[in-house]
């Protein structure tokens, strides 16, 4: 428990009963009241991360617009929280845009992403008056320009550049390399051509450049390389209408006790310093800075709680512990081979006694949540807590095997509230004729 403190919300503690508690709430009690699997977010941790982003950049003398990347977890309660904390919002689809509007974001604080904004989404973003669109390819550049012109408006846009920076992360979440489906490659002159095409389009107004090179990044050096690449481009193209630069998201979090991610304050210093240095070195005025964190705001705040159903011991081979969720509510282990360090929530003070494999209840052998978990003796009825599961978890949930998607509760100073109710069987069939 003590070694895991980076991985859990700051409020995490073990109470007198040996139960793990978060935000002053006993996870065993929450599981009994709300059922499992249950996704628990520490609201104080969410707000603290948002504040750390705001204050981290301000402290460095270069305030940045902090744009929450909603795809990491786009529950309405989270979006409202991000709005209350003064963050802007990044959406990557018509659905996320709808949620941002429902959460009350003023349109000028909405940034629209996506590598394939379909015609309907282009109409929807123009209807909503979305502040800024991040352009990803020539076809949508042309389509958006035509659609905006037809309405007699000029849509503010940023050009997403693929700078040819390859960060050290899983290939599925690396986006800065030349061979990427995202953005205009700097190589081949496509990014420059995109900027020129925006300048020539009557329906579009250039705001600046964007780059998001990857996710779960633990090495801040990539931001220096990214800022240099963008500043080079701005210098070549003439920087008078490139007044803003969006450095994307990507800051990693600790999933295991030996991961030591940079703090948000360190990230803020590195990113604002990188942009300041890159632009100053070329004699250009330092642009307005935007960043788009997702994981590092919601990841550490979330803990998923499962109930153990069965224990299967194959002598000399392995012990399997089956829980009541799995790949349907938490796909990352299957998708990226992600590693987690679980705890027994009802016996969080116990010393490790065995190594087990924690598996879900789905009809797939690959439905593994934790390959090697070192835990006190686990038996049916125990509760497994998966720390650091607040990002890219419940937002990727599916109904595979007819699994209702889990309930989500926010906890804060001893109080809990359901922000998303558990799906019912009827909910799952509600759309079927
Ligand atoms: C996913 C994404 C982010 C957020 O990334 P994190 O690693 O969760 O911080 C930011 N910007 C864009 C364009 C993204 O696709």
Image (cartoon, rainbow, N blue to C red):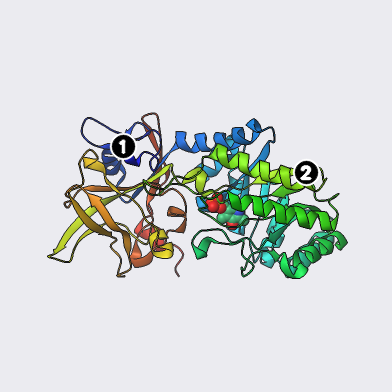
| Residue mark closest to the camera, 1 vs 2 | 2
Between residue 8 and residue 329, name the one nearer to us.
8
Tag 2 or tag 1, which sits nearer the N-term? Answer: 1
Between residue 275 and residue 422, name the one nearer to us.
275
The x and y percentages for residue 425 are: 35, 59
Residue at numbered disc 2: 280
Quarter of the figure that contains the C terminus:
bottom left
Residue 363 horizontal side relative to residue 302, left or right? left
**Residue 298 versus residue 367 in the image, above or below:** above
Which quadrant of the figure has residue 314?
Answer: bottom left
The x and y percentages for residue 316 are: 14, 65
The x and y percentages for residue 69 are: 58, 50
Residue at numbered disc 1: 2
Residue 413 horizontal side relative to residue 382, left or right? right
**Residue contact at pointers 1 and 2, CB within 8 angstroms:** no
Residue 31 horizontal side relative to residue 430, left or right? left
Residue 263 horizontal side relative to residue 208, left or right? left
**Residue 197 versus residue 393 in the image, above or below:** below
């Amino acid at each position: 428990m003590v070694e895991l403190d980076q991985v859990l919300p700051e409020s995490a503690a073990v109470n007198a009963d040996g139960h793990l508690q978060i935000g002053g709430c006993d996870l065993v009690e929450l599981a009994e009241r709300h059922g499992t699997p249950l996704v628990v977010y520490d609201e104080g941790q969410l707000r603290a991360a948002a504040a750390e982003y705001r204050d981290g950049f301000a402290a460095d003398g270069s305030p940045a617009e902090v744009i929450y990347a909603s795809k990491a977890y786009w529950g309405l309660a989270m979006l409202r929280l991000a709005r209350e904390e003064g963050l802007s919002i990044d959406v990557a689809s018509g659905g996320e845009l709808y949620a941002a509007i429902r959460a009350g974001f003023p349109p000028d604080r909405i940034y629209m992403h996506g590598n394939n904004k379909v015609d309907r989404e282009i109409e929807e973003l123009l209807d909503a008056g979305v502040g800024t669109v991040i352009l990803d390819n020539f076809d949508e550049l042309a389509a958006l320009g035509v659609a905006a012109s037809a309405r007699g408006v000029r849509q503010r846009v940023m050009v997403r550049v693929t700078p040819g920076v390859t960060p050290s992360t899983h290939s599925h979440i690396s986006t800065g390399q030349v061979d990427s489906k995202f953005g205009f490659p700097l190589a081949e002159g496509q990014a420059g051509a995109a900027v020129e095409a925006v300048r020539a389009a009557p329906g579009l107004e250039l705001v600046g450049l964007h780059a998001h090179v990857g996710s779960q990044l633990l090495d801040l050096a990539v931001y220096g390389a990214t800022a240099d690449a963008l500043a080079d481009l701005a210098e070549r193209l003439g920087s008078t209408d490139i007044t803003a630069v969006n450095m994307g998201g990507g800051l990693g979090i600790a999933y295991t006790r030996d991961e030591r991610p940079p703090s948000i304050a360190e990230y803020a210093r590195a990113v604002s310093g990188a942009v300041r240095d890159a632009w100053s070195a070329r004699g250009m005025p330092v642009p307005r800075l935007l960043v788009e964190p997702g994981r590092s705001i919601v990841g550490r705040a979330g803990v998923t709680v499962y109930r153990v159903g069965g224990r299967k011991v194959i002598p000399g081979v392995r012990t399997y512990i089956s829980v009541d969720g799995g790949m349907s509510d938490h796909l990352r282990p299957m998708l990226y081979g992600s590693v987690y360090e679980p705890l027994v929530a009802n016996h969080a003070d116990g010393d490790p006694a065995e190594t087990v494999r924690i598996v879900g209840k789905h009809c797939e052998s690959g439905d593994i949540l934790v390959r090697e978990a070192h835990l006190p003796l686990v038996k049916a009825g125990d509760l497994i807590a998966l720390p650091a599961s607040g990002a890219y978890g419940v937002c990727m949930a599916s109904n595979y095997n007819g699994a209702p998607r889990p309930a989500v509760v926010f906890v804060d100073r001893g109080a809990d509230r359901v922000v998303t109710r558990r799906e019912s069987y009827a909910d799952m069939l509600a759309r079927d004729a």
